[in-house]
Image (tube, rainbow, N blue to C red):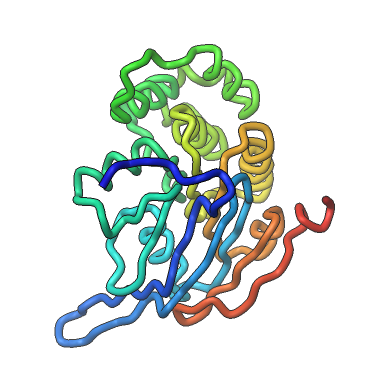
Amino acid sequence: MADVPSESSSPIILAENLTKVYAAGRIQVTAVRGVSLSVERGEFVAIVGPSGSGKSTLFYLLGALTRATEGRVVIDGVDFAALNDAERTRLRKHRIGFVFQRFNLLPTLSGLGNIEIAYTISGRKEPMDRQYLDHLSEMLAIRGRLDHRPAELSGGEQQRIAIARALITRPAIVLADEPTGNLDTTNSEAVLRMLQRSNRELGQTTLMITHNPDAAAIAGRILHMRDGQMVKEEAGKAALRS
């Protein structure tokens, strides 16, 4: 199937009746049960729920990191079900930037090296835009830290470099899974502000998974999960301020 963006008026993320069943020996565990959701371009949406609610499994389904047992996911007009593994990998590299709870920085590379290798792996032919990198470095307050290796950086600095790594390819979508889970309160607030700022200034659609209602509150829309299902939707503080 051709990797062609949909019309700008359509949702950039569309999930219909998603179900994911895992086999644990002879037992089947249903992690996600018939979830449907729609995310518009430029939205900041948080999915919140306790441990075991299915939110991380949903993250993997929406990020094309695993296949649904039932239902479908459409990202920017592309239906995952129509893609083979190589095409799914290409879609992830070109359309989605990932931010994880574990920073996943390569310890032998500097912050800049981690960003550069992510850009190289994305397969883009054009050189990395250094002016854009400078803009990201200023926005994320890491300009003076890019020559340091991860062990020389604080947790907050490592996460901000991980965010720069996710943004350097200018993805249409940023998926963040518990991005503040390993951070103290001060660094958590800083990282959340950076995600909010990147969403507003760069126009990327942001979907954040979190167990923390206070973190979720910065989003424009909050979806609550429990027992593998969506149970409630509410406006976040960003929507209430607009």
Using the image as rendered, state which of residue 43 and residue 51 is in the foreground: 43
Q: Name the residue at 38% across, 13% down.
A: 127
Question: In percent of the image, x 57 and y 16: which residue is there?
Answer: 134
User: Is residue 113 shown above or below 205?
Assistant: above
Relative to 78, does residue 31 appear above or below in the rendering?
A: below
**Whole-percent x and y of residue 84?**
19, 51
| Residue drawn at (73%, 64%) of the image | 235
Q: Is residue 171 left or right of residue 89?
A: right
Name the residue furthest right.
Answer: 241
Determine whether 119 is above or below 233 in the image: above
Q: 40 or 146: nearer the eye?
A: 40
Which percent across, then down, holds residue 216? Answer: 65, 59
Q: Is residue 80 left or right of residue 186?
A: left
- Specify the farthest residue to the bottom: 26
Residue closest to the far left: 25
Badge count: 0
Residue 17 lies left or right of residue 123; in this view the side is right
Q: Position of residue 31 (x, y in %)?
A: 37, 76
Which residue is at 42% across, 78% downward?
Answer: 34
Residue 79 place in picture, x, y as percent: 35, 55
Quadrant housing residue 28: bottom left
Give residue 139's quadrant in the image. top right
